[in-house]
Amino acid sequence: MPQPIASGKVREIYEIGQDKLLIAVSDRISAYDVIMPEPVPDKGKILNQMSIFWTRYVADLVPNHMIATELPDFPAEFQTAEFEGRSILVKKLKMLPIECIVRGYITGSGWADYQRTGTICGAPLPAGMRESEKFPEPLFTPSTKAAMGQHDENVSFERAAELLGGDLAERVRAVTIAIYKKCARYALSRGIILADTKFEFGLDESGALVLADEVLTPDSSRFWPLEGYEVGRGQQSFDKQYLRDWLTENGLRGKAPAALPPEVIARTRAKYVEAYELLTGKAFA
């Protein structure tokens, strides 16, 4: 049985020779930085297939790390049922030390920052914005990558430029916003608002900028149904917000329950399936 070189809250990463990785997406689910005791069936397959869909959709904007997505194209030791549908073979890259967050609407931690300071990551914003309001233009708000168990730290663009170099930071910002705009337009055509998301990039052996990691999944993005959208309040979402709400209502925010009720698991799974089917136009089998 292959052994991963890294294991996160959701993903397992396996090294294939010197220049490739295999990333497998588990059915584990975390909320408030705590892994829940039960998995959500098929969640890993849904996330993996959504990420593949979006990565291909923006291939005209930026190269990506994908080499193979189907089991017969994986090394022999990974051609087993446990890797089917939830894995991807990718190029090994020199990963950039920032996460590229782009916000189209004011919500979440950005809304909290704005209420306190009138800015997000130091970027000045119009006065009088309301929760869930669309920005005049998408905001690029990078963060540094925290060690396991710690929170990422939002930083200014100037700080990102210090970490990456000015030219690379400008390229990353431009590509991040271009990807967001293209995908937000598409999502809107499917009845979904892409409120915000995050991307990761690396450099290949020639120094080219390459899109990596997950792309536009409900775990890395905030999707809202267009129907019922209203400025001035929080929105319903196609992600694990239902699970977060259940934990909060039961006094379990930041804690792992002894067990998740079957209906909570089923409702959470249904949200992921709904997002997949609406965005891709395909039934999840």
Image (cartoon, helix red, strand yellow):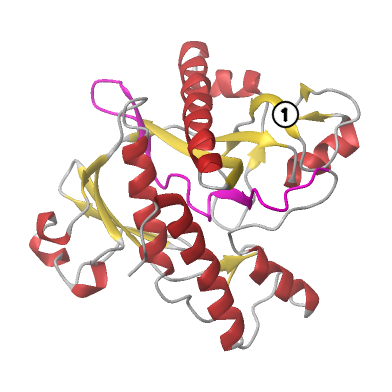
Q: Is residue 211 above or below residue 150?
A: above
Q: Is residue 161 left or right of residue 230?
A: left
Q: Which residues are magenta?
A: 203-231
Dominant secondary structure, magenta? loop
| Residue 222 x/y as whole percent | 61, 49
- Nearer to us in this view, 163 or 25: 25
- Image quadrant where one finds the N terminus: bottom left
Q: Is residue 190 above or below residue 257?
A: above
- Nearer to us in this view, 56 or 11: 56
**Quick check: is 91 in the magenta stretch?**
no
Q: Is residue 179 above or below residue 263?
A: above
Q: Quadrant of residue 79?
A: bottom left
Q: Residues within 10 Å of mark 1 (few under 14, many from 20)?
A: some
Does residue 260 appear in the picture of this structure? Answer: no
Does residue 166 appear in the picture of this structure? Answer: yes
| Residue 189 x/y as whole percent | 52, 40
Q: Residue at x 29, y 62 (%)?
A: 4
Count of marks placed on residues: 1
Q: Residue at x 17, y 71 (%)?
A: 80
- Circle 1 residue: 135
- Image quadrant where one finds the C terminus: bottom left
